[in-house]
Image: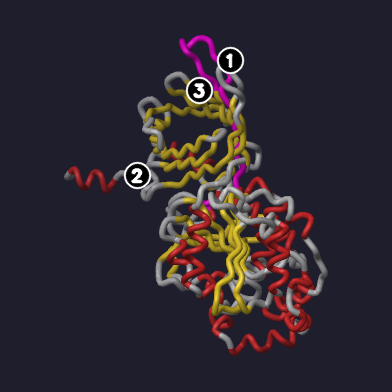
Amino acid sequence: MTESEIQQSRAPDSALKRLDIFVGRWITEGHTWATSSSPALRITGTDTYEWLPGRFFLLHRADVQIGDEEIKTIEIIGYDALSQTYPMHYFDNQGNSGTYQASVRDGIWTFLGGSERSKVTFSDDGNTITASWEHSDNGLNWLPLMEVKLTKVEDFTAHPGYTAPANQDREIVHTHSGKSAKSSAAPLNGLNMYYEIHGTGRPLILLHGGVGASEMFGPILPKLAENTRVVTVHLQAHGRTEDIDRPLSFELMADDIAALIKFLGIGKADLLGYSLGAGVALQTAIRHPETIRKLVVISAPFSRDGWYPEVLEGMAHMGPEAAQSMKQTPLYQLYPDIEWEVLFTKLKDLLRQDYNWSRDVATIRAPIMLAFADADAVRTTHMAEFFALLGGGKQDAGLDDSLRPTAWLTILPGTTHYNLLSSPELASLVTRFLDAPMPDA
């Protein structure tokens, strides 16, 4: 038998099956222990374990934030039959690399490497991992290092043959922008929220308007994704996110977005919302300020009376009867599984509710860009009121620009509420706003 034939005949050691319990995507939370030279630091992020093809090696990706420091690690885990241990080789984004040895006895895993060791235990249902880490300078006296808890959010064993990279991106889709993107669904708050990831870089989440979904951003998506990791989301009952038994509300959908940010393990994100999605974006900044770096609000008011009366009249006529007209539209072909009558009924119930978020909007500390059309569905006087709530339009900025507000106001000429997202100028202005330095605290 040739060496090649021997390699082909090899089968994974049965002991590797013990690693199956790690396979999946996990939300990571914890803290380091304070020392004489360092305070205790919060740990947040994600860990992903998946088999490489052949199932000889388990790939572990960690993407965590420890205090203000971002740590990205790749680890390869195998099995050594001679020592009956699991060698673990890791590499991180700070140039560090090293090895650990893992062993398991009575369901408790022990990781040992250099000056660190950990006891790792699983809950009875296998959905929670608890790890207590220690370090030692001499191998004799061990001191607490950190406590970590991992909560499983997806079991990859439910998807046979799963070999996707980190962040649960298990499908490559051809998008409306003509570029490929990674897509998946996040299980959160009872939803399976569909999302796509385009490009790499600082995270930017796009929230679409009512009835449609991420295809709305097709004209501006390529520009936004040039140097940004753009996440396009399908809100409840829209696009490829199925409806669940709850009403549509700005607040509940904002909670979904905050949960998605946590699920993706991206810390703070930039958030851009259009029309209905802008209302969700505002509520996300109000209810979950810790998740937002910068906010872009496109063509939406802070109170219901900010819409022109004829727009409110049109909202009042939404309902199951109006949904019949969708059968003649491209959206009907694009998203055949949407329950259009249910969606239109829930949108009607949402849009007829009165609201005024002026007091809450004024408390938002994240930098905000307001963008409107010069012939928008939002009253022009309301645009000025909105800008004033954010400290704008109250004084001259001065020759040195030192007195300008942190908020930006953009009104694009020759556009309407319905074609604003097709404006190439919009993408350039948004990019300029997001790339601008953060204001001093």
Residue 107 at x, y percent in the picture: 57, 31
Residue 277 at x, y percent in the picture: 64, 66
Report the span colored magenta.
134-157
Q: Which residue is mark 1?
A: 36
Q: Nearer the viewer, residue 416 or 255?
A: 416
Number of numbered callouts drawn: 3
Q: Is residue 224 above or below residue 438?
A: below
Q: Which residue is mark 2?
A: 11
For the point 40% across and 72% down, the residue is 178
Q: Is residue 81 above or below residue 301?
A: above
For the point 65% across and 45% down, the residue is 290
Reply yes or no: does residue 154 show up in magenta.
yes
Q: Nearer the viewer, mark 3 or mark 1?
A: 1
Tag 1 secondary structure:
loop
Task: Of the two numbered discs 1 and 2 on the same chain, state the one appearing first in sequence.
Answer: 2
User: Cα distance, mark 3 to mark 2?
Assistant: 31 Å
Q: Nearer the viewer, mark 3 or mark 2?
A: 3
Q: Nearer the viewer, mark 1 or mark 2?
A: 1
Give the left or right position of residue 324, taking residue 159 as reference: right
Residue 326 at x, y percent in the picture: 63, 85
Tag 2 secondary structure:
loop
For the point 56% across and 30% down, the residue is 120
Q: Is residue 73 above or below residue 39?
A: below
